[in-house]
Image (cartoon, rainbow, N blue to C red):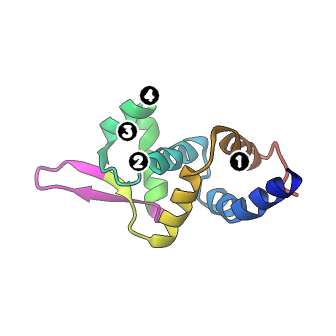
């Protein structure tokens, strides 16, 4: 059991570093987790706000930050509708896939580590 825990920590250390560097706010982490569950989705701001039950105004800055960090990309269709999706960067997809594989408890531990409540050994 201890070996599993140590292996888990070592395997997810890269994911932890990626998230620490790229999710400065709780909302940014929530958006990254959202895209981990929907990696091929292309969604409008309204759809994302509805799915996350948050105001669009709160999402704009977080989405913009993730676009600047190269995690999300913005596309505009011929009618002016702007949609957001994961970037095509294979390295980003690797981290997103790894995040999607975490169970509820692993995600809770990771979130506490990011918030500084837990310490990596």
In the image, taking residue 50 as reference, residue 25 lies left or right, namely right
Measured Cα–Cα span from mark 1 to mark 4 = 22 Å
- Residue 77's place in the image compared with 91, above or below, is above
Measured Cα–Cα span from mark 3 to mark 1 = 23 Å
Q: Is mark 1 on a helix, strand or loop?
A: helix
Q: Residue 96's x, y, as percent?
A: 52, 57
Q: Earlier in the sequence, mark 4 or mark 2?
A: 2
Q: Residue 70's x, y, as percent?
A: 46, 65
In the image, taking residue 28 as reference, residue 55 lies left or right, namely left
In the depicted view, which residue is nearer to us: 38 or 77? 38
Q: Give the range drawn in magenta.
A: 68-83
Q: Earlier in the sequence, mark 1 or mark 4?
A: 4
Numbered mark located on residue 48 in the image: 3
Residue 72 on the magenta span: yes
Outermost residue, top direction?
A: 53
- Residue with the mark numbered 4: 53
Numbered mark located on residue 110 in the image: 1
Q: Determine crowd level at label 1: few under 14, some 14-19, many 20+ residues with C-alpha closer than 10 A.
A: many
In the depicted view, which residue is nearer to us: 70 or 102? 102
Numbered mark located on residue 94 in the image: none
Q: Earlier in the sequence, mark 3 or mark 2?
A: 2
In the image, taking residue 15 as reference, residue 73 lies left or right, namely left
Measured Cα–Cα span from mark 3 to mark 2 = 11 Å
- Residue with the mark numbered 2: 38
Q: Earlier in the sequence, mark 3 or mark 1?
A: 3
Which residue is found at the position 49% from the left and 55% from the top? Answer: 65
Which residue is found at the position 60% from the left and 46% from the top? Answer: 25
**Residues at discs 1 and 4 in contact (Cβ within 8 Å):** no
Residue 47 on the magenta span: no
Measured Cα–Cα span from mark 4 to mark 2 = 16 Å
Q: Residue 18's x, y, as percent?
A: 63, 62
């Amino acid at each position: 059991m201890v070996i599993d825990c140590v292996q888990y920590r070592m395997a997810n250390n890269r994911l932890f570093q990626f998230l620490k560097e790229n999710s400065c706010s709780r909302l940014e982490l929530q958006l990254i987790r959202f895209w981990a569950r929907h990696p091929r989705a292309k969604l409008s701001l309204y759809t994302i706000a509805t799915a996350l039950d948050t105001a669009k105004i709160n999402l704009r800055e977080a989405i913009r930050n993730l676009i600047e960090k190269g995690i999300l990309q913005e596309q505009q269709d011929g009618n002016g509708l702007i949609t957001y999706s994961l970037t095509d960067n294979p390295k980003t997809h690797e981290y997103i896939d790894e995040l999607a594989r975490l169970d509820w408890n692993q995600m809770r531990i990771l979130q506490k580590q990011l918030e500084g409540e837990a310490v990596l050994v």
